[in-house]
Amino acid sequence: MAVPLRFSTPAPSSRLEEIIPGSDRIEELSDSSGEYEDMGTATVEEQAHIAYLNSVRIPITDSLETATSRMDDKTAEIILPFLEGNPDGFTLNTFGIPKLQRESHAGALEAFLGDYPARVAFMDASRPWIVYWALQSLTALGIDISAYQKRVAHTFSLAQHPDGGFGGGYGQLPHLACTYAAILSLAMAGGTETYETINRKTLWHFLGRMKQADGGFTMCPGGEEDIRGAFCAVVILSLTNLPLELPPDAPARKRGLTSFTDGLGEWISKCQSWDGGISAAPGNEAHGAYAFCGLGCLAILGPPKETLPKYLNVPILINWLSSRQCSPEGGYNGRTNKLVDGCYSHWVGGCWSIVEAATTTGLWNRTALARYILSACQDEEAGLRDKPGKNSDAYHTCYNLAGLSAAQHQYKYDENVNKGLGTGNLGAAYHWKTEGVYDGKNNVWDEGDVVKTIHPVFVIPYMSVYEMRKYFEEKEGF
Ligand SMILES: [Zn+2]
């Protein structure tokens, strides 16, 4: 992490000079080195922000200049003014931080659910995702989405493939990512008629075709096998309460597997990289979104307290996740040496509820993340974004708001919650609750900036999760 440009550059201490001569040394920043070169006409609030940013920056920086470090410097130069001041002129909350711009974000989300011009045709295969991101974001803002119920059911009834699973739209081949987004959207839309549009028998067969002999899942027939497949498959199996036995025509049966969960925990275990993160597939580089997929998968396979230590080295995982929180920006990056990005507010920020359910609380800086989201990720026009200078979109709006929810609410795993639900297959994830809004040091949000609670594993509202599972638990047969 390079030094943010508005911090004055310190001289290395003489002690360090003695130890490591020349340009190869690591520069050490002394405690007194944080003054700004030009405080300009900073307001009292801005001075407080600047003092805060100064207090959380990483005190040691690598002096080696690379394309990556230059990009990091440039990014800090773009982002810091948004953390220090209020360049877009938003209304501020009592902490001098931009308020959550609910109305403009809601307007953008409603537009995302509308018609698209021809130039967006390339997004056609991602339609289920756009519907999911927009609906989930609207519910996070506390907006009633019941007006979309019939449209959602109709859209996905056309996207359902005759051989099982969902594609991007009518006539498209089924894919696990589309099926995941479709099932979550249908859960949010809710209602018996909506649930009954899902052909669970063909869905079961489709998932059976995705199961691989080594325990993992492919994303589509003949497609890549990665941890997204594992997570999407168990989310779908769990929410629709499908039998865990592999269908008779599942190819993995020929290799001796009988259940969807055979070898799955062991396969996820192999995805943990040497540095503690979780990668797409064994041997790959760790990545924030894959970390969430792996942890989400384990939180569905069983209580986090049991499954995380069973299949992962939890201490090095915590180290890797902690290292993703950028300083002084406060948001997360997705990989080592990459830039802060609002979508990792969820992909990494969302990991903490599951990790803390297996270990202890207080492992991460919630308010630093909320500060990044509210100050730097709200688009002046509408919606939320990766970082200043990037356009807002449905994806970043959804995952910034989900990350904000993870920061603001204390999600707890409690096996005494919903005792009557999730007693059967893959039922562990139905025992989560919310223990109030976090109120800690350096808090940056007012009541009006607090988003709704979101189920920490399924990433849709709690009620949507519980109602869909309950419906399919009570239903007999397919
Ligand atoms: Zn992003």
Image (cartoon, rainbow, N blue to C red):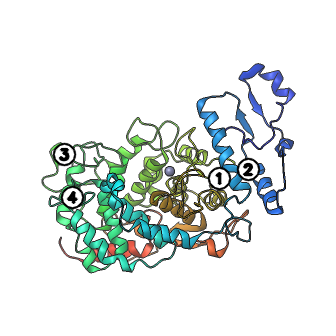
Q: What residue type is labelled 1?
A: Gly
Q: Give the alpha-carbon distance from disc 1 to disc 4, as whole Å.
A: 44 Å
Q: In this view, does 86 lie above or below 220?
A: below
Please state if 244 lies on the left or on the right of 328 as rendered: left
Can residue 233 be seen in the rendering of this structure? no
> Could you tell me which secondary element the residue under label 3 belongs to?
loop
> Could you tell me which secondary element the residue under label 1 belongs to?
loop
Badge 2 crowding class, 10 Å Cα cut-off, few under 14, some 14 to 19, many 20 or more, is some
Q: In which quarter of the image is residue 26?
A: top right
Can residue 21 be seen in the rendering of this structure? yes
Q: Name the front one of labels 1 and 4.
A: 1
Counting residues from the start of the chain, the first of labels 2 and 1 encountered is 2
Q: Mark 4 points at which residue?
A: 245
Residue placed at 73% from the left, 63% from the top?
Answer: 441
Q: Does the residue labelled 1 lie within 8 Å of ligand 1?
A: no
Would you say the residues marked 2 and 1 are in contact, meaning their CB atoms lie under 8 Å apart? yes
Would you say the residues marked 2 and 3 are in contact, meaning their CB atoms lie under 8 Å apart? no
Whole-percent x, y for residue 155 in the image: 27, 68
> Could you tell me which secondary element the residue under label 2 belongs to?
helix
Q: Give the alpha-carbon distance from disc 2 to disc 4, as whole Å.
A: 50 Å
Counting residues from the start of the chain, the first of labels 3 and 1 encountered is 3
